[in-house]
Image (tube, rainbow, N blue to C red):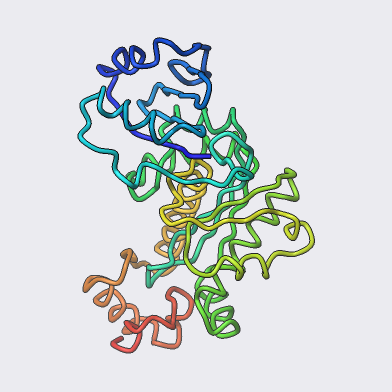
Amino acid sequence: MNIYTNKFSPKQFEKIKQFFKEAVFSDLQYGQWRAEKNGYNACLYNSGKFVLQGKEVSSVASDFEQFMGISTIEQKTLLSVSNELDLSFEEYIGTDESGKGDLFGPLVIAGVYTDKNLAQKFEELGVKDSKKLDDKTITKLSAHIRNSAPHSVVVIMPEKYNELYNSFKNLNKLLAWGHARAIENVLNKQSCKYAISDKFGDEALIKNALMKNGQTITLEQRTKGEAYTAVAAASIIARAEFVKRCNELKNKYGFDFPKGVSDKVVSIGHDFVKKYGKENLKYVAKMHFKTINSL
């Protein structure tokens, strides 16, 4: 099964419909329409996202882009998906994390279950990779996602993070443990056969970390996994929780801890050490970062 996706403006909606004039149209919740014909089906959402899937996608997409005046099909928009894991229309769990590259603050891993209806609802709300959204939008969308779908948020505050890292001795193994816990927690609320996560290492790490409930699940890791709605939803609630927990650390210690590992991060780190001592960094920072050596 191949899937072609693209984004269009409302001014292009009528032209898109003209291309599929020989197809059979039906209503699409949170969308303009669904068009079906032998070999493919197409969906146009109110947000402008267009999804074309089926066995004949490559040739249809090529003709479609020519009709729309797009010069060539970009490789990144044509996603090959196995027949048994059609994630655009099957129910599945998506996982993603926040805080992995930030010296200060926790590591947060979230899992979100979606089915066809939830995916359409999230598309309409504007759910996408959290890195493309501001904190205010992330907070608002996170509340919608939490109220709508079975989910799990695994928060590993710095002190616990440092303990786990010393135990695993490897960041990917720690991440796999967190993703596995998120999947297991969602499975305790909602049965599901499939899961997908943004790729960060060998997917066997997550599979090996899964417990009884998760051992029967089909798991895949994909580069730019946030292209899948459930993974994007997970990235949003993970980021919202990360921001919330960083604010709690700010209120406790009186420092506005910056994200990332910039010069400003180093400066705040020096100020924190002066006030609280380096021995207390483990309560606010990830101690295996090389930046720690300069504080």
Q: Position of residue 170 (x, y in %)?
A: 52, 80
Q: Is residue 162 left or right of residue 44?
A: right
Task: Please tell me which residue lies in front, 215 or 138.
Answer: 215
User: Which quadrant of the figure has residue 208?
Assistant: bottom right
Q: Residue at x 38, y 68 (%)?
A: 101
The residue located at (51%, 60%) in the rendering is 108
Q: Quadrant of residue 8?
A: top left
Where does residue 245 sit, x and y in percent of width and height?
47, 59
x then y, percent, for residue 95: 55, 53
Indicate the quadrant containing the C terminus: top left, top right, bottom left or bottom right.
Answer: bottom left
Q: Is residue 164 above or below residue 204?
A: below
* Left/right of residue 264 with respect to residue 139 in the rendered view: left
Tell me where residue 96 appears, x and y as whole percent: 50, 55
Number of callouts in the render? 0
From the viewer's perspective, is residue 74 above or below residue 122? below
In this orientation, which residue lies closer to the viewer: 244 or 8? 8
Q: Residue at x 50, y 24 (%)?
A: 41
Residue 257, compared with residue 217, is above or below; it is below
Q: Nearer the viewer, residue 59 or 68?
A: 59
Q: Nearer the viewer, residue 215 or 285?
A: 215
Quarter location, residue 125: top left
